[in-house]
Every structure is written in C-alpha cells, then in structure tokens.
C-alpha cells in the first residue's frame, strides 16, 4: 500500500524538522495553483500551494490577496497507520480511514457544533459514490461513472451532468475541476489532492452539460500543456441562459458567459 509505505518513510526520517543526513533527504515537491478573480470591487489573487514530501501531501496553504490585504487558510496532514488526519486552521478536523489500496472508505468531519460523516465507494480504484450524513441524518450523495478511466457523468440527487473526456493526458494526476467543486465532494478537495480518494482520471474533461439536454447551459475547458507534459493552465468557460425581468414585468432571455483561468506551477 503506497500511502502507508510513504508514511513509514516519513516516520523513520524525522529529519524533516530535526535534520537528516544528506543521503536520506526527503523528496519535497510543491504544486502552486493561481487564479486571478475580477469583480466590480477589484481583483483578487487566489493561490493554493500544495506541498508533498516523499509523495505524501503534508500541507495546503490558500492565500487570497486583494489591495494591500491578504487572508490565508492552512491545512496540515498527519499520517498514522491507515488513518490520515487533516487539521484546518479554523480548528476543524477531518479523519480519513484508508483501505488496503490506500483509498479512504470513510471520513469523520468534525466541526465545532456539527459532525459530518462520509462513506466512499470505489470500482476498479475509481471513486463511484460519496454518501454524506450530518449528525447521523443522511443528507446528500454523489454518484460518478467512468469509461476507460475517464469521467462520463456526475449525479447529485436528481441532477446529473454528462461529461465529455478530452485527449489531454492527466500526467500530473490532478483532480477533475468538476469533482473538486461539486457538493459534497467539494468538502474533500484536500483528500482529492492527497490522492486518497481513488485514481485520477486518465484524461481531463473537455466539457459537461446537464444530462437532460439544455442547449442554454454548458461548461468547456481548454488545457495548456508544458514541456514536461503536465498541464500548466486550465481555462474554464461557462455559458448559461437565464430570464431577466424588467421594471414592467417583461421577461427576456439573457445569455451570460463567465470565464476563469487557473495557472499551475510545479517545483
């Protein structure tokens, strides 16, 4: 089990903080994702830095900068046997229990006044279902389908999205943006980037639309691949049509397009 082997390596090499011999220096790898978000109030730069030591995600720092101010959010990771504990800077914790393949089968997410529990189901190593309960009461679930290692659909309750895989190889094993942003799996972004929620898709998703065809709504992705073969930029374009009501009560359809770009650096 890869995760447990790496965890043992970390335990043996306490030198990360105390000093290790030159021959046994841990492998440190960082991935930084940067997004500039613009609005009427100005622009905000959001940066997510993921630090891996011997292929284990050990910290995630999110920084949002605007004007002359900045806010940060930190997550630290602790590995012990088949348990991974995430501690958030707000004081919340998420405890993941791993199976023999190193993938989480359950999670207890402890907030100050609420306990959320999650069950994770897999098929051939790919995450196929997430079931959430809040204080013991079933609340929400996601269902995922794949074909040849690529994501083809995502369902949340009665809402289903049909996904079209592209040809861009996921060599850096990044989580699909749709998976990382759809509730309740969105609460487990750090576990996705820690690679404890199943295999990454073989290819990135090019687009997704509602399963019940709606020509007025679609999301498309464009990927820029660097010399290393890893994706270094993701462009997302969301198009949807809504109804605008004027002061006289007249309804007019209006099509809106929003775009975002995420830049990715590997060190």
Image (cartoon, rainbow, N blue to C red):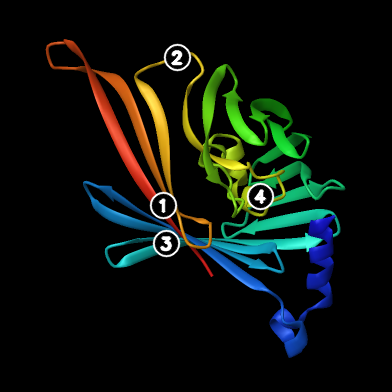
The label nearer to you, 4 versus 2, is 2
> Is tag 1's residue or tag 2's residue first in the polypeptide sequence?
2
Where does label 1 land, which residue? 262
Of 3 and 226, which appears nearest the observer?
226
- Picture disc at residue 191: 4
- Label 4 and label 2: CA atoms lie apart by 32 Å
Image position of 238 (left or right of 53): left
Residue at x 37%, y 49% (from the top left corner): 261
Where does label 2 land, which residue? 213
User: Could you tell me which quadrant the N terminus lies in?
Assistant: bottom right
- Label 2 and label 3: CA atoms lie apart by 40 Å
Measured from the top left, where is residue 160 in percent x and y?
55, 21
Q: Secondary structure under badge 4?
A: helix
Q: Work out whether residue 104 can be spotted.
A: yes
Q: Secondary structure under badge 2?
A: loop
Assess whether mark 2 and mark 1 are in contact (beta carbons under 8 angstroms): no
Image position of 32 (left or right of 152): left
In the picture as drawn, the residue positioned furthest to the left comes out as 248
The label nearer to you, 1 versus 4, is 1
Compared to residue 23, the image places residue 149 above or below, namely above
């Amino acid at each position: 089990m890869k995760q447990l082997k790496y965890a043992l390596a970390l335990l043996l090499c306490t030198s990360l903080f105390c000093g290790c011999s030159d021959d046994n220096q841990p492998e440190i790898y960082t991935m930084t994702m940067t997004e500039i978000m613009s609005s009427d109030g100005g622009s905000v730069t959001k940066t997510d830095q993921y630090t891996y030591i011997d292929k284990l995600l050990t910290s995630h720092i999110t920084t949002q900068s605007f004007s002359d101010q900045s806010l940060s959010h930190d997550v630290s990771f602790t590995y012990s046997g088949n348990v991974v504990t995430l501690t958030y800077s707000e004081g919340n914790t998420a405890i993941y229990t791993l199976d023999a393949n190193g993938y989480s089968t359950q999670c207890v997410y402890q907030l100050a006044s609420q306990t959320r529990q999650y069950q994770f189901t897999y098929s051939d190593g790919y995450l196929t279902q997430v079931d959430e309960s809040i204080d013991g009461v079933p609340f929400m679930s996601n269902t995922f389908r794949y074909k040849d290692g690529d994501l083809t659909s995502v369902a949340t309750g009665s809402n289903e999205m049909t996904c079209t895989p592209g040809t861009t190889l996921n060599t850096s094993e990044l989580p699909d943006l749709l998976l990382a942003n759809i509730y309740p799996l969105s609460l487990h972004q750090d576990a996705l980037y820690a690679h404890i929620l199943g295999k990454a898709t073989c290819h990135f998703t090019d687009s997704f639309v509602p399963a019940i065809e709606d020509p007025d709504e679609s999301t498309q992705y464009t990927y820029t691949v660097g010399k290393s073969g890893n994706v270094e930029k993701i462009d997302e374009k969301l198009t949807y049509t809504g109804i605008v009501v004027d002061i006289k009560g007249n309804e007019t359809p209006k099509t809106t397009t929003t775009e975002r770009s995420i830049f990715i650096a590997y060190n």
